[in-house]
């Protein structure tokens, strides 16, 4: 039996992409860089492949105190673009093995991740209050709001991050799935409070003083437990990370 060939398009402009997307409708399958493969169901259902490689979404540019990273940049390019955020670089390294790091595009990482799932990199990005520019849109949205959009999650044309921030990241333990048992990202805000993202089997974002965040973590109890680690272990580990990272961040701030 021969292989069925699907129509393949490589638009040269966003206008062409929008036209193809509208024309193909539910039959469209968008290829947004490395790390994303059509599964068997998609390959059978999809009749039109639209490849975004020619849209120049693999660029990095700096605007003021922000860095704009194209959605087709891979995770290795993210590390290079965010050298001013060494703790973010650490989170990228912890996300997956080297092969995935260097080939998976940001757009594919973001559309495969979910707030309810475990992800060291997503934890760090949430703590940094990253913003997303969805493709074909003109307004950015916060990373948290990006996942509240109706599925399918729109492809990210850009990931927007601060060029530098008083940001710390740490993790403890790894599971059989090669994911940390607990991760935490902390960004100290200009109002003296902290934006804290925790990955304890699921992702949560907290904001407030250190004491307020500690109380919130203490109140979670067994909610933090799953098949990989118990709630009490994760709770105690998060409180240790909170102490360590908040002290490290304060020392870094005072030495500037």
Image (cartoon, grey):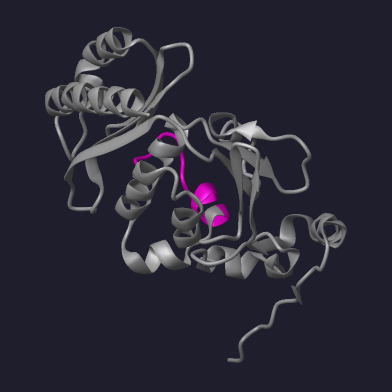
Q: Is residue 35 magenta?
A: no
Give the residue displayed 50% in from the left and 60% down from the top.
77
Q: In the rendered image, is residue 240 in sight? A: yes
Q: Residue at x 73, y 61 (%)?
A: 27
161 left or right, relative to 231: right
Q: Which residues are magenta?
A: 107-118
In the orientation shown, which residue stands out farthest toward the bottom?
1
In this rendering, position of residue 193 left or right of residue 7: left
* Rendered position, 14 above or below 138: below
* The quarter of the displayed image where residue 43 is located: bottom right
Q: Is residue 119 visible?
A: no
Q: Position of residue 230 (x, y in %)?
A: 14, 30
Which image quadrant: the C terminus? Answer: top left
In the picture provided, is 220 more to the left or to the right than 19?
left
Please tell me which residue lies in front, 111 or 48.
Answer: 111
Quadrant location, the N terminus: bottom right
- x%, y% of residue 187? 40, 26
- Along the line of sight, the residue nearer the viewer: 87 or 51: 87
How far from the left and from the top, in percent, is residue 42? 59, 64
């Amino acid at each position: 039996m021969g292989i069925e060939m699907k129509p393949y398009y490589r638009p040269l402009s966003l206008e062409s992409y929008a036209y193809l997307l509208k024309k193909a409708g539910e039959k469209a399958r968008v290829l947004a860089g490395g790390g994303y493969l059509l599964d068997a169901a998609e390959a059978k259902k999809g009749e039109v492949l639209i490849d975004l490689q020619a849209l120049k979404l693999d660029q990095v540019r700096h605007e003021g105190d922000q860095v704009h990273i194209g959605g087709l940049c891979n995770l290795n390019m993210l590390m290079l673009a965010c050298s001013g955020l060494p703790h973010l670089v650490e989170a990228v390294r912890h996300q997956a093995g080297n092969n995935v790091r260097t080939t998976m595009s940001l757009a594919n990482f973001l559309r495969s991740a979910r707030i309810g799932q475990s992800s060291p990199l997503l934890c760090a990005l949430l703590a940094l209050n990253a913003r997303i520019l969805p493709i074909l849109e003109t307004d950015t949205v916060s990373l948290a709001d990006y996942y509240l959009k109706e599925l399918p999650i729109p492809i990210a044309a850009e990931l927007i991050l601060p060029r530098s921030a008083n940001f710390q990241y740490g993790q403890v333990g790894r599971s059989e799935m090669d994911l940390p048992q607990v991760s935490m990202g902390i960004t100290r805000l200009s109002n003296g409070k902290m934006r804290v993202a925790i990955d304890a089997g699921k992702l949560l974002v907290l904001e407030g003083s250190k004491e307020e965040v500690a109380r919130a973590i203490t109140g979670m109890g067994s909610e933090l437990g799953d098949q990989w680690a118990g709630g009490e272990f994760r709770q105690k580990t998060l409180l240790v990370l909170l102490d360590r990272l908040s002290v490290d961040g304060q020392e870094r701030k005072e030495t500037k």
